[in-house]
């Protein structure tokens, strides 16, 4: 508890990179100890503890978010997925454990050294064969995939937790690669709660730098007639119930517009966990775009904390 103007106030999270918007550490700890840690696979617990010792541990996916992703992947019966931004692989392991034995993950990151911290644990969990790790910038590879029509609509799920200034660039490419009915998740779209901070707020340099990109992306999505957005604050699931204190972003899109109106836009910003799900709209519209000059698709955007 902390004293403010002589009054005792509930303790708040002190860490800038905390994954929850909850104002009480005790309440968040309750969530973890009640519904997250008891169900966390041993391999994920081990990787979480190893990652906690790394100097960049703020980059990792939180345990409750990992649980959410694992459940979501099972609900949508995902089989072919992509992850941009791997770090030590906590969310990657969560995905791999959720996929069927013949499931596949294309994992992209500029730093293989961090990935190899978690690789022994991933191997011990028996899911390393599901992962195709590629070291290097993601955009060049995505451009190659977009040029190959066989890759269009080939991914059930895509998770992005990487360079925030490229989120919109990623989105403009990934939207072609995810299948109708698939899901794309963008992490960090509330950017540590800094989006509503006053201009003179004491923010860390990296938080302040990427903040504008996040704001830009959120603005772009808000006025994009192809999408409908519902952004809620941190995700905690218990028996398929969403805790009212948890953040989630829902974005649904359905469009029928001339192609020239749907061209790639200049890069706005990242958001917090935004999951875009293309609904089961007539898939023939996507395949016959060049013939009919229209794009018809739906996106469901779900977000979970930062």
Image (spheres, grey):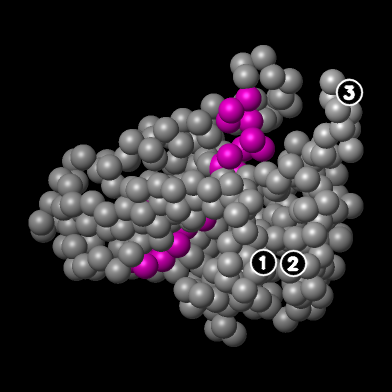
Q: Picture quarter containing residue 156? A: bottom left
Whole-percent x and y of residue 115? 73, 58
Residue beneath the point at 31% across and 58% down: 298
Taking the view exactly as shown, the residue that stands out farthest to the front is: 7
Closer to the camera: disc 3 or disc 1?
3
Residues shaded magenta: 174-197
Spatial CA span between label 3 and label 2: 36 Å
Spatial CA span between label 2 and label 1: 7 Å
Q: Earlier in the sequence, mark 3 or mark 2?
A: 3
- Residues marked 3 and 2 touching at CB (< 8 Å): no
Quickly name the residue at label 2.
Answer: 36
Relative to 96, is 34 on the left or the right?
right
Q: Secondary structure at mark 2?
A: helix
- Residues marked 2 and 1 touching at CB (< 8 Å): yes
Closer to the camera: disc 3 or disc 2?
3
Q: Earlier in the sequence, mark 2 or mark 1?
A: 2
Q: Secondary structure at mark 3?
A: loop
Q: Is residue 158 visible?
A: yes
Would you place residue 123 above or below residue 227 in this image?
below
Taking the view exactly as shown, the residue that stands out farthest to the left is: 292
Would you place residue 165 above or below residue 115 in this image?
above
Q: Nearer the viewer, residue 262 or 251?
A: 251
Q: Picture quarter containing residue 301? A: bottom left
Rate crowding at label 3 as few (under 14), some (14 to 19) or many (20 or more) other CA atoms within 10 Å: few
Residue beneath the point at 62% across and 16% down: 199
Quickly name the residue at label 1.
Answer: 67
Q: Secondary structure at mark 1?
A: helix
Closer to the camera: disc 2 or disc 1?
2
Whole-percent x and y of residue 214? 53, 34
Q: Nearer the viewer, residue 146 or 289?
A: 289
Quickly name the residue at label 3.
Answer: 6
């Amino acid at each position: 508890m902390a004293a403010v103007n002589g009054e005792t106030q509930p303790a708040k999270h002190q860490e800038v990179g905390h994954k929850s918007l909850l104002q009480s550490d005790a309440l968040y700890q309750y969530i973890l100890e009640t519904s997250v840690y008891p169900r966390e696979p041993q391999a994920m617990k081990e990787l979480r503890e190893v990652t906690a010792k790394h100097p960049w541990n703020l980059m990792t996916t939180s345990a409750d978010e990992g649980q959410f992703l694992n459940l979501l992947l099972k609900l949508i019966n995902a089989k072919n997925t992509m992850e941009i931004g791997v770090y030590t692989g906590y969310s990657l392991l969560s995905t791999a454990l959720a996929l069927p034995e013949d499931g596949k993950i294309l994992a992209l990151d500029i730093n293989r050294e961090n990935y190899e911290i978690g690789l022994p644990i991933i191997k011990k969990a028996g899911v390393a064969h599901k992962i195709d790790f590629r070291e290097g910038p993601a955009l060049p590879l995505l451009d190659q995939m977009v040029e190959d029509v066989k890759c269009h609509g080939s991914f059930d799920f895509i998770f992005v937790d990487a360079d925030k200034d490229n989120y919109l660039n990623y989105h403009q490419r990934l939207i072609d690669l995810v299948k109708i009915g698939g899901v794309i998740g963008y992490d960090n779209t509330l950017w540590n709660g800094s989006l509503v901070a006053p201009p003179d707020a004491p923010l860390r340099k990296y938080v302040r730098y990427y903040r504008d990109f996040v704001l830009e992306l959120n603005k772009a999505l808000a006025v994009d007639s192809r999408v409908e957005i519902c952004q809620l604050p941190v995700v905690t699931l218990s028996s398929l119930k969403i805790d009212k204190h948890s953040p989630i972003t829902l974005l649904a899109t359905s469009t029928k517009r001339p192609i020239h109106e749907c061209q790639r836009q200049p890069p706005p910003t990242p958001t917090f966990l935004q999951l875009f799900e293309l609904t089961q709209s007539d898939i023939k519209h996507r395949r016959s775009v060049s013939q009919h000059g229209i794009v018809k698709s739906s996106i469901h955007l779900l977000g979970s904390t930062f």
